[in-house]
Amino acid sequence: MASFRYGFILLVMLALAAVPTVAIAIDEPFYVSLFTRMLVMAIAACSLNLVLGYGGMVSFGHAAYLGLGAYVVGIGFYHASNDGMEWALNGWMHLALAITIPGLVALLIGAISLRTRGVYFIMITLAFSQMLYYFFIGLERYGGDDGLSLWFLSDFGGVMDMNDDVDLYYLSYGLLLVILFLLYRLVNSRFGMVLKGAKSNERRLMAVGFPTYRYRLVAFGISGAICGIAGFLMANQSEFVSTAEMHWVHSGDLIVMVVLGGMGTLFGPVLGAVGFLMLEQYLPELIRGGCEVIGGNNCGIAGEYWKIVFGPLLIMVVLFARGGIDGLLQGKVGRNG
Amino acid sequence: MNWILLIEQCLNGIQLGLLLFLLAAGLTLVFGIMDLVNLAHGSLYMVGAYFAATFTAWTGSFVLAIVLTLPATLIVGAVVEIVCLRSLYNRDHLDQVLATFGLILFFNELVRLIWGPAGLNVPLPEFLSSSLELLPGLVYPSYRLAIILASLTAAFFLYWLVARTRIGMLIRAGASNREMVGALGVNIRFLFTIVFGLGAALAGLAGLMAAPISTVEIGMGENVLILAFVVIVIGGIGSIRGAFVAAILIGLIDTVGRAFLPDVIGTFFDDEFADAAAPALASMSIYLLMAVILAFRPEGLFSARGG
Amino acid sequence: MAEVLTITDLVKQFGGLTATDHLSLSVDEGEVHAVIGPDGPGKTTLIGQLTEDITPNSGSIRFAGQDLTGMPVHRRSMLGLARSFQITNVLADFSARANVALAVQAHQGHSFRFWRKAASDPRLVDPAMRCLATVGLEDRAEVSASNLSHGEQRQLELAMALATQPSMLLLDEPMAGMGPEDSARMVEILKRLKGDLTILLVEHDMDAVFALADRITVLVYGRAIATGAPDAIRNDPDVRTAYLGEEAEDA
């Protein structure tokens, strides 16, 4: 089963590498942007997995870091186009700020939230992400509720062009690979051992001499920084920045992706993000198709209400297949897979 | 400073705070007694508002709608508890978060299926559509006053129920020590269903009262849910008293802050900055308050457990 | 001989209950000092004040020249005070070796090291294997802690405590829940450690206590009614009436 698992993951990663070539060959450029979104969400889910899957911290506020990363691009664009500050479009600067700002904000939020446990932690991370959401709604200058349409994207000089879907796709793919490799090193390092140990038994870790709080906090900051990268990509992909993406319901989506793919495994979140967006894209059609097969009326409407299936489906995954997709690949079906 | 405006805003703040209390009271009991994170509580608020819209349209009377909505949301809550949440009590918090998140998607879609995607408007009841002059120069809508009175009545009823009745005794015992209630041989399952149904009815009440002064729409419970969380975190999980104090505090700070912060900032900085920053800062104020309180009291102001 | 741990006039009250009652106690370097007593809360509260966040109402606990009261849990470990837990408390989803390696790691400076693989780092693995060998678990190193027997988990507890290179070991009922065979093995292991290590042993099992201890303190209602060598304690009339009396008659 193990070889099947790695084979499947390798296949998914290779297939993702081939997406632009195939999409152009079959003349369906739409797939490039759909799959870019999958890669972006995969990065965000990987970042959440670091704290949720490896660290056992149920952060319900990661959409905020995604949004912060996106607003770096949006605010840069705003000043470039309204105040003539051309340099504000510099892509390298965007990327650097989209890592540091969400990372620092996550450190700040984590410093307060990690003093608490359990239900409190969930609610507090939720509340702080909602605070940032309202903060950006209040910033009328940068579009407030309506968001910002980006006429110019991050500028990487001659290196790559964010307006080119294929360039953006491979940038996202490359960043995902780099992040996966860094996370692989991190979770197996001494730091990773403390993080996983604190998830397993925090009291024991403190008794052997680890000040667990600061390790968790640093993990939380790293997670926020990685999530910011996803936000940077998301802004360039959708050519639009808005508060809607920061809403707490999207934090919920990210948790679902991580659990759907398999918590605490390296590739689980990638599988989860791909699976989630596939469902979002194709479940309506699937329901419509299924409805037509059994000869129902108003199948178009049935397809529209796909979330009425998606919600209970989610509950089922939680209750019966906690290992997620990666757990299934390992042949573990039970809930703690 | 304009005193009339200040009093008016304070009344608005109290009214918002009381609505939040109705939401938070049920939620904090569910957290405290069942140790369950229920994200779908906001859906019950939404369902209450939709029921109110439908029943008002059917009966033509807002009062009759209230009479019908309360038991209806109680039943919805009890059914949700029996069908879905009951199996989650022994799960970890992540399972609960995910499953109740799934419930939100389900409820939103169900409401869209039944009532359609467009928002609904509930007319103000005729007899409360006027205004009262509370003080010379202070004219206040009578419907909002009615909300304050009705919420206070509900809060007193809850206080009486929890402090003076046998069920209340069990609820209090459960919030401070769950195992003990089980050891007393009480039918825990039934108690849980009752508590959940009660919480649902309170959320429904908040939803139905908010209906005429806001738009009844899908997802209306999602933002207000987070405010209820802030209330619970500040008040302390499982504490009704804490929820009440925190809810009023949040309602006042949020409302008064939004109304006066631009002026306050304007006296220190130039107007342009004040106009740009004030709305953003005002909307952050309650969360900053939460952060400050947590920094000093991680368990909230009135923790029901070991506090 | 130098005193490693000095407890002076310690008092802890919970509401009306006095769990620690003007307790004074010292542990010398290299000795095994056992604390016995019929009541549970007294011993648990004492351990809580030594190793956890229970703050005494008055009195002092000095260890390695520092006052322990109010000190964060992880810093006590850094000072060289290691403990084993009464209820087995290991990282269930880690292998035995990884459990001990983590304890080794805790005492090799900070762990903000993000790159090198911990599982193949000889600076962690070698000391971990030595500690496992000391407690006789070297053959079970790769087994997940949750799959170890109860007795083996207790041995793992001990190995984790040893891995922190403590100057004193606080053993909270190391024989709890063990059968006679496992108990005997644990006594053998502790006997081998005796002399190299300073040990404060809190234990119910009288055979183990008399086999290991250099000195014994008898705690009744949080108060030390006697302290002395095992023979003196055995013959102390106060102790016989208060505690050993019934057991002596049984035997």
Image (cartoon, coloured by chain):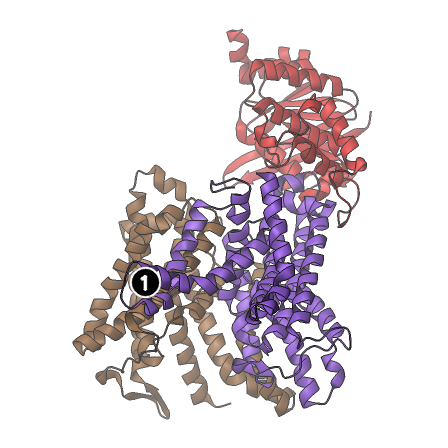
Chain colours: A purple, B brown, C red
Residue at (48% x, 41% y) in the render? A333
Q: Relative to B89, say whether A294 is above or below.
A: below
The residue closer to the viewer here, A161 or B196, is A161
Residue at (66% x, 65% y) in the render? A172
Q: Amino acid at mark 1?
A: Glu
Residue A70 point in image, percent of width and height: 62, 73
Q: Which residue is mark 1?
A: A292
Q: Residues within 10 Å of mark 1 (few under 14, many from 20)?
A: some
Residue B156 point in image, percent of width and height: 31, 64
Q: In the rendered image, which quarter is residue C134 located in?
A: top right
Q: In the rendered image, which quarter is residue C170 located in?
A: top right
Looking at the image, residue A240 sits to the left or right of residue B79; the answer is right
Which residue is at the far left? B59
Q: Mark 1: which secondary structure?
A: helix
Looking at the image, residue C225 sits to the left or right of residue B306; the answer is right
Looking at the image, residue C148 sits to the left or right of residue C29; the answer is left
The residue closer to the viewer here, A48 or B173, is A48
